[in-house]
Image (cartoon, helix red, strand yellow):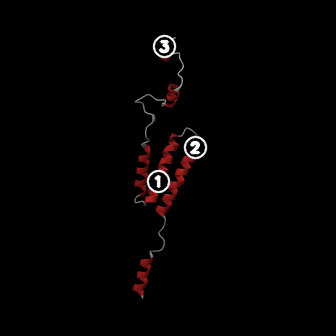
Amino acid sequence: MSREAAETSPTAAPSGRAASLRNLRPPWQPGQSGNPLGRFKHVFELFDAMTADLGDLTGIDQALLWQAAKLMARSERSKDANEAVRLANASARLLASVSQKKHRKPGRPPLREQLAEVESVG
């Protein structure tokens, strides 16, 4: 059998460089997505709904809400029940911390206001 016939034969096993390159190729065809589910857009919807409910937020609170939205979306997609519960609980704790900060009763007035009151009385 000639060398060309061996290379083009369907039963011939690839060898050398061709075999190693075949292992590096992705399992999907050209033009086919490597992520068939695509980017999960539900995260953005969750984040928008949470920020609308909580109103004006600091940057840290927004970051916490973004993380909570990502955890909620992951818990919805999880195939493992234990992981889904763990992710949902983590997102609930983040939401509770932001909500508690938002609904916390204001403490004492700022120092400037206290000093202004003292000066006006005195």
Question: Where is residue 84, by image quadrant?
Answer: top right
Amino acid under label 3? Ala
At x 58% / y 39%, what residue is drawn?
80
Mark 1 and mark 2: Cα distance apart in space: 20 Å
Mark 3 and mark 1: Cα distance apart in space: 62 Å
At x 51% / y 27%, what residue is drawn?
17
When the figure is inspected, residue 32 is found, relative to residue 49, above or below; the finding is: above
Camera-nearest residue between 5 and 95: 5
Mark 2 and mark 3: Cα distance apart in space: 53 Å
Query: How many residues crowd around disc 3 within 10 Å: few (fewer than 14), some, or many (20 or more)?
Result: few
Q: The residue tagged with tag 2: helix, strand or loop?
A: helix
Camera-nearest residue between 59 and 16: 16
> Which label's residue is closer to the chain start, 3 or 1?
3
Residue annotated with mark 3: 5
Amino acid under label 1? Leu
Residue 21: percent from left, percent from top: 50, 29
At x 49% / y 65%, what residue is drawn?
104
Residue annotated with mark 2: 83
Q: Which mark is residue 65?
A: 1
Question: Where is residue 36, by image quadrant?
Answer: top left
